[in-house]
Image (cartoon, rainbow, N blue to C red):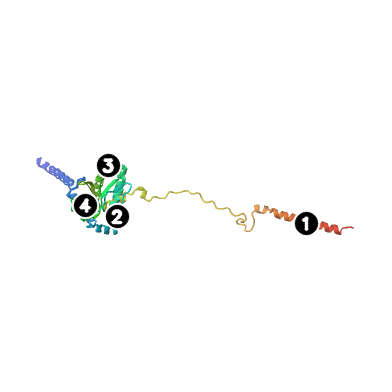
């Protein structure tokens, strides 16, 4: 009996081991940074064939080529002491989208504190695998309002769960570091277009039919060319009647005078 039960016990142990290995293999979704997190960010930048800017001139060159675009701020977010306000187009889209939702939830604007940084301007405590020089990272100021902190961290973790970015809450100085995975986020944003941007069929407008104009009074009826309508034949011009009566009266007067002149003595 013991020998018969042994295979089932072994199989159960193996199944538990496999499940635990699968859980361990999946990267933990947290706001804590780690070497594995930095390696993941850097590997994504390399896979995307991004150029790592060495100097400010290299950033300017990427801007001229259209690889980096400018962030100007707006109603939902602002920039604070950002030396190079340029980033990848997908990162700009991310900032605009998440800041709009953030302001609705918290009533305040997101504050961007850093975007693309060349390697020559990286701070002393920057990681050697930092993706700021690649233009795919953005740093945000941590709000003083706890409800805003909770909302933003929950949103970032939800994006990280979908493998759209990697987010870390840094402590020196305090800020949120977000590396946006541009290819993944581009596909996600395309699926999440607001309804206002989606093409919609034009509403059907019921318009009254145009009434055809009535034919002119002088136009003949169809089927009888040149023949006036009965109503038109019955009408007589008053001036014509007056001329006719005047002519008859004149003839009568002339005839009367001739008869008088030639009558008996």
Looking at the picture, how far across and down is residue 36, in whole percent?
Answer: 18, 50
Res. 49 visible in picture: no
| Foreground tag (3 vs 4) | 3
Q: Residue at x 85, y 57 (%)?
A: 260
Looking at the picture, how far across and down is residue 129, in whole percent?
Answer: 19, 53
Q: CA separation, marks 1 and 4?
A: 118 Å
Residue tagged by mark 1? 250
Q: Residue at x 29, y 55 (%)?
A: 69
- Circle 2 crowding by C-alpha within 10 Å: few under 14, some 14–19, many from 20: some
Residue tagged by mark 3? 148
Residue tagged by mark 4? 41
Q: Helix or strand or loop: what does disc 1 sit on?
A: helix
Residue 69 numbered tag? 2
Q: Nearer the viewer, residue 27 or 53?
A: 53
4 or 2: tag closer to the N-terminus: 4
Q: CA separation, marks 1 and 2?
A: 102 Å
Is residue 27 shown above or below 54?
Answer: above
Which quarter of the figure has residue 150? top left
Quadrant of the drawing holding the C terminus? bottom right
Q: Helix or strand or loop: what does disc 4 sit on?
A: helix
Q: Is residue 72 left or right of residue 39?
A: right
Which quarter of the figure has residue 15? top left
């Amino acid at each position: 009996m013991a020998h018969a039960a042994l295979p089932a016990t072994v199989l159960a142990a193996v199944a538990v081991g496999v499940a635990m290995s699968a859980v361990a293999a999946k990267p933990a979704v947290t706001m804590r940074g780690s070497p594995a997190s930095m390696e993941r960010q850097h590997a994504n930048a390399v896979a995307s064939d991004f150029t790592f800017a060495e100097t400010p001139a290299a950033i300017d060159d990427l801007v001229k080529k259209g690889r980096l675009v400018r962030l100007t701020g707006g109603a939902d977010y602002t920039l604070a002491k950002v030396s190079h306000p340029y980033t990848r187009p997908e990162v700009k889209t991310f900032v605009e989208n998440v800041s709009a939702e953030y302001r609705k939830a918290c009533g305040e604007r997101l504050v961007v504190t850093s975007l693309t940084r060349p390697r020559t301007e990286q701070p002393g405590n920057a990681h050697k695998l930092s993706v700021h020089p690649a233009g795919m990272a953005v740093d945000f100021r941590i709000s003083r309002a706890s409800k805003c902190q909770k909302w933003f961290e929950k949103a970032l973790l939800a994006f990280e769960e979908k493998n759209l970015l990697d987010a870390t809450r840094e402590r020196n100085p305090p800020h949120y570091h977000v590396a946006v995975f541009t290819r993944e986020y581009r596909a996600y944003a395309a699926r999440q277009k607001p309804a206002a941007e989606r093409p919609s069929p034009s509403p059907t407008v019921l318009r009254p039919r145009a009434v055809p104009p009535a034919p002119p009074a002088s136009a003949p009826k169809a089927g009888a060319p040149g023949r006036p309508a009965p109503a038109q034949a019955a009408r007589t011009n008053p001036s014509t009647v007056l001329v006719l009566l005047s002519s008859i009266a004149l003839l009568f007067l002339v005839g009367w005078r001739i008869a008088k002149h030639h009558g008996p003595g």
